[in-house]
Amino acid sequence: MNNVITNAEVFYKNFKALPKKNRKEFIKILLTDKEFEEDLTDIAIINQRINEPSISLEEYLSKRKSFRHEI
């Protein structure tokens, strides 16, 4: 098993073993971390948009270029 996954599983298992009060306090600390907050926001947006149709980079750049010329 991948070492990163193993470490994450051990961490999560230990987190779940904490009393609820300690878990809440830990989460409060995490949520004061701006970088962590940004990561959570990114993950939430990705999960919300996961089933949206995608376009190629070339198509996106072409549309963007056309849009800029219209302005």
Image (cartoon, rainbow, N blue to C red):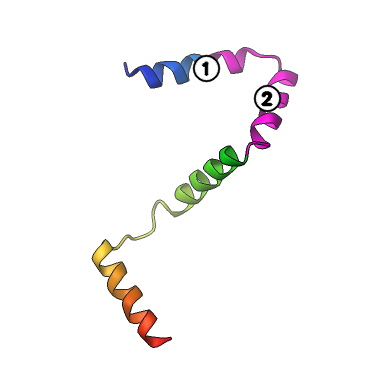
Query: In the shown orientation, is residue 16 left or right of residue 53?
Result: right
SS type, badge 2: helix
Residue flagged by tag 1: what amino acid is it? Answer: Phe
Please provide percent x and percent y for residue 40.
55, 41
SS type, badge 1: helix
Contact, mark 1 vs mark 2 (Cβ under 8 Å): no
Residue bearing mark 2: 26
Residue bearing mark 1: 11
Please provide percent x and percent y for residue 41.
55, 47
Please provide percent x and percent y for residue 62.
28, 74
Judged by its main secondary structure, the magenta piece is helix
Instruction: Place residue 37 in its image quadrant.
Output: top right
The quarter of the image holding the C terminus is: bottom left
Instruction: Place residue 23 in its image quadrant.
Output: top right
Residue flagged by tag 2: what amino acid is it? Answer: Phe
Boundaries of the magenta span: 13-33
Query: In the shown orientation, is residue 16 left or right of residue 62?
Result: right
Instruction: Place residue 52 in its image quadrant.
Output: bottom left
Magenta region includes residue 2: no
Q: Classify 53 as above or below 27.
A: below
